[in-house]
Image (cartoon, grey):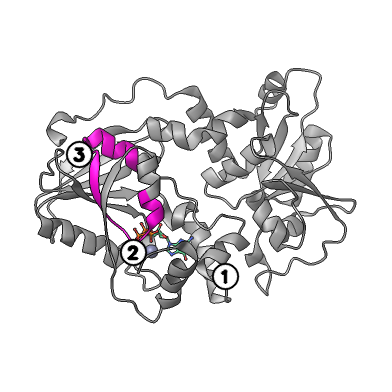
Amino acid sequence: MTETLRPAAPLSSPPPAPLLAVDRAAAELRRGGPVVVLAPDQAPLLIQSVEGVTGDSLERLVHLSGQPLALCLTARRTRLIGLDPGPGVVAALTSDLPLTADRMLRLADPGTAEDMGGVGRIDDLSVVPLLAGTVADAGVQLAKLARLLPGIVTTPVACAETVRSWASSRNLLVVEAAAVLGYAQTAARSLRLVGEARVPLVEAENTRILAFRPADGGIEHLAIVIGTPDPEQPVLARLHSECFTGDLLGSLRCDCGDQLRGAIDAIHQAGSGVLLYLAQEGRGIGLVNKLRAYRLQDAGYDTMDANGQLGFDDDERVYLPAAEMLRLLGYSRIRLMTNNPFKVDALSRHGVQVEERVPHVFETNTHNLSYLRTKALKGGHLF
Ligand SMILES: Nc1nc2c(ncn2[C@@H]2O[C@H](COP(=O)(O)OP(=O)(O)OP(=O)(O)O)[C@@H](O)[C@H]2O)c(=O)[nH]1
Ligand SMILES: [Zn+2]
């Protein structure tokens, strides 16, 4: 395998424009700045992350658009605060009363309330359901890609000029909804090997690490190859989603640290195999949101409900990058170490032949017992 793989040429050719536009827009949202999202046949929206809202930033949005503001939340979060999102994947909330920065934050983020969930009055709020594929849906997805809370403040852009020149004369970034919605797939398909080295590990001396980077310059996923797997045989493999707290710090809240070291040990014992270390911390919601979810769990929510309170799905991960890395490594048949049947399904859908699911269970402790029980009861994990 690795003999034929060489790092791609330095990233001299520019990344595909849609990836670049999404990456820049995500960075702008993280800085608290506004971005224009557009799509054919839909009114463009000027959006801002709810995390960055202040009185001044809301005033700026109104000044730029001259139109009223709305708060867009995921359908799941909308339902949990007691409103009906109808058929929408996203709901736009408006009020006759001024929607202040504090109130928007409280509606979007349960962690801002003393009681971890109280949102105050909702009887003045009107809800407009927004379907999948709309600019508002893309805006919320962009906030997720930026690893922010999935909530945005929106205002329509109604201008006589074309929206692109309107935006450029005001120094605003523009991103197309289709680019945001197709980002995960485009980024996964653009993965390239950018570096590799021999890294002897305590548990497995004959180990190489290969780094795969998406063309937008986003975070690398890593392949940890132990021994020399034979691509003609099913390769023992582990897909491990990043967990800073468990992998690096040995947190007892989850089983990740044990699973990571256990997988390296098991592959070493078996003679060869690969561990894919996937940059999707916190089941894809990012470290900061995972910490928010932990606070909610300390207040009584389980691991899935805590994700929901924040407006996320139970699990936001995608496995196309993993399938793409296996393809680049030349491993089309694997024996997958996991307790999560969804990983098996997802890889199979992406063209990887999973010949066997190898259970990957470790001792529980008093801190992770209910987390693991919830994964079994609600997530279908096999323990
Ligand atoms: N959102 C959220 N993520 C968590 C929590 N606890 C652990 N995680 C994340 O869950 C992921 C666990 O990844 P994996 O061990 O690869 O996946 P898994 O779904 O448990 O499946 P297997 O371990 O393969 O059986 C990591 O990204 C962790 O950071 C939590 O309470 N909330
Ligand atoms: Zn963990």
- Ligand 1: quadrant of the figure: bottom left
Amino acid type for the residue under numbered disc 1: Leu
Screen quadrant of the C terminus: bottom left
The residue range painted magenta reads: 322-344
**Is residue 27 one of those drawn in magenta?**
no
* Residue that mark 2 sits on: 256
Q: CA distance from mark 3 to mark 2?
A: 24 Å
**Is residue 337 one of those drawn in magenta?**
yes
* Residue that mark 3 sits on: 196
Residue 206 drawn at (x, y percent): 9, 50
- The quadrant holding residue 323 is top left
- Give the SS element for disc 1: helix
Q: Is residue 377 above or below residue 128?
A: below
**Label whose residue precedes the other's in the sequence (1 or 3):** 3
* Residue that mark 1 sits on: 296
Amino acid type for the residue under numbered disc 3: Glu
Q: Is residue 238 above or below residue 157?
A: below
Residue found at x 26% / y 24%? 9
- Give the SS element for disc 2: helix
**Label whose residue precedes the other's in the sequence (3 or 2):** 3
Q: CA distance from mark 1 to mark 3?
A: 39 Å
